[in-house]
Amino acid sequence: LPILLVVDELLSLRGITEGTLVWTRPNFFAFRYELVCSAGPLARLTVHGIGAARHALMETSEERWRFAIFPLERREVPVSRESDAEPIAMYHRVNPAFVQFQGGELFQFQPRSTVETVLSDGEGRAIFTVELVETFPRWRVDLKLEPEALSLPQVPVLLGAACCNLVFE
């Protein structure tokens, strides 16, 4: 019997008006995380490949980004569009974690508590806050967006980095 895998189509991040989104792991047995709003899924982060080619793939309706997160000991993670191997950013897995884009834009994760972290730009303006709500069995993170967050062209990569920051640490 053939197995049919149905994957929801992703909605555009650009049309979102909700202030809080949710990263969740919809299936405990699958290494797949989804960023959802009340209308449906907006982004998906999954693990692909084996060996040296293993990576996390962040997908939105507009683009797909590859996070070369493996091996997990790697502290500097190149981020590239799936269609192009050239890094567009470097995700630094240090404490506190940060993302530096090729154009020089810097975004830093600042822990507020054991369950809450704020992502700020290089001038200290908050972009979004992530709050770990549930770890087992489903894993859930509330992501509270600042009003101007979705206007930033870097936001899809930053959302992927936020998920990686929680899942792979």
Image (cartoon, grey):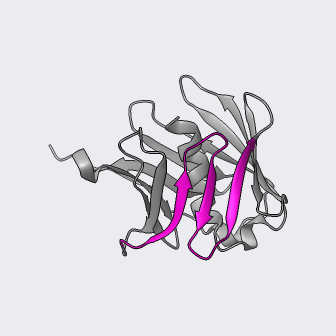
Q: Quadrant of the N terminus?
A: top left
Q: Is residue 45 magenta?
A: no
Q: Which residue is pictured at 45% across the width and 30% down the height? A: 28
Residue 97 or residue 43, whichever sits in front: 97
Residue 154 or residue 108, whichever sits in front: 108
Q: What x and y, as percent, mark residue 65?
A: 46, 64
Q: Which residue is pictured at 53% across the width and 45% down the height? A: 164
**Which quarter of the picture shows residue 15?**
bottom right
- Image check: 127 left or right of 165? right
Q: Magenta residues, as a range?
A: 85-110
Q: What x and y, as percent, mark residue 113?
A: 78, 30
Q: What x and y, as percent, mark residue 115?
A: 73, 30
Q: What x and y, as percent, mark residue 60?
A: 52, 65
- Image check: 11 left or right of 75? right
- Image check: 139 left or right of 14? left
Looking at the rendered structure, the number of numbered marks drawn on it comes to 0
Residue most toward the top?
136
**Which quarter of the picture shows residue 84?**
bottom left
